[in-house]
Amino acid sequence: MFTALFPFGPGLNAILATAYISGPPNLLLALIPPNIDPDSLSTLVSFAVGGLLGDVFLHLLPQTFVGEVPGHDARFVLVDEHRNTLLGLAMFIGFAAFVILDKVMRIVSGGGGGHDHSHSHSHSHSHSESASASSVESSKTKPKKRGTKKKEEEQKEEEEEEEDSSSTGGSSIKLSAYLNLIADFTHNITDGLAIAASFYVSKNVGATTCLAVFFHEIPHEVGDFALLIQGGFSKARAMQAQFVTAIGAFLGTFIGIGINRLATASPVSDASFSNDPTGIFGTNVEAGDLTLPFTAGGFLYIATVGVIPEILESGQNLTKGAKIKQAFYQLIALTFGIGIMFLISWNE
């Protein structure tokens, strides 16, 4: 079966495997209805958060600090006391990079929740003062029309402020969707690198890696799709965005093919087993080792800062019983998302 699916050399097989894992999961999104009701979307977004957190804690971080060995093979690793520090720093840099990127995008788009809140609060305070002043003035003097006109102007200003705050809230939700696309693109690069490297080990290892990534991508793509829909994307635009992020997988595959061809052309010693490491700051950490923790930091920011606050604030207009029911479904969906990632990581 593997021979029929991957009949070429390691390079072409890696490209073919990337096409296998990029196409079908994205095409499955066509089965999701375009107009999802808010309750279903909230549950789907909770599933996406579970998938993101499960991907970070059960897949990316273990692979970052320990690595992965195909099958049940044994592996010997020389311990470098500074390696984990650098990898943890890379994760923080990934988190901080998305904080900075989010802040810059908010400034450029004119967003900023704290400013809007204080702005509307101060205006409402001034409105109440002006309203009380106008009432005192109307009690002292006769003109009632003037007070009515002022109240109409105040009402109009309040409506405009509500529209501004709602548009600002919408733009901030879209920012989290764009940030998720960036993180997904970098994550797909790491998938492409892993696939290319595995096929240069052997065809069987490459095929099993492709299978693992394929089953890993299906819940991941569904979760990303839900986040894009929540961020204001239409179904067609969300599917287009998912296909764009798939370019990252092909980019990673081509980079991996180039690295492996260079490695086979000139013998290079493995830094993990060298007594004289030549990596970053004299450790055995290479630049490519920082991609996974950087991506993990980005996913952690998106899940905890970008999406979970939206889940906590959802259903504000519901009754108490409906809120409890919605929270129960959200918790089940989040647990289900983490559970799927656990099963995939356990059986990889």
Image (cartoon, rainbow, N blue to C red):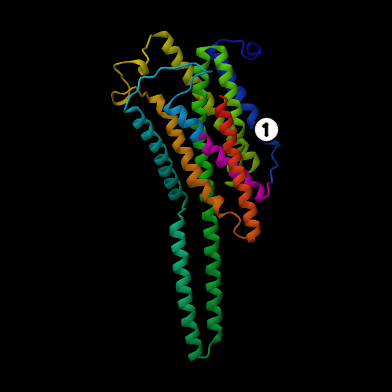
Q: Secondary structure at mark 1?
A: helix
> Looking at the image, which residue is at 64% across and 15% down?
5
Range of residues picked out in magenta: 36-55
**Disc 1 crowd, CA 10 A, few/some/many (<14, 14-19, 20+):** few
Q: Tell me residue 14's x, y (percent).
A: 55, 17
> Looking at the image, which residue is at 69% across and 43% down?
34
Numbered disc total: 1
Residue 49 on the magenta segment: yes
Residue 50 on the magenta segment: yes
> Looking at the image, which residue is at 39% across and 19% down?
77
Q: Quadrant of residue 114?
A: bottom left
Given the image, on which type of amino acid does mark 1 rest? Answer: Leu
User: For mark 1, what is the residue?
Assistant: 28
Q: Quadrant of residue 3?
A: top right
Q: Tell me residue 201's x, y (percent).
A: 50, 13
Vertical position of residue 175 compared to residue 87: above or below: below
Vertical position of residue 27 compared to residue 195: above or below: below
Vertical position of residue 208 compared to residue 64: above or below: above
> Looking at the image, which residue is at 47% across and 86% down?
137
Quarter of the image that includes the C terminus: top right
Q: Tell me residue 79's x, y (percent).
A: 35, 23
Q: Tell me residue 277's x, y (percent).
A: 31, 19
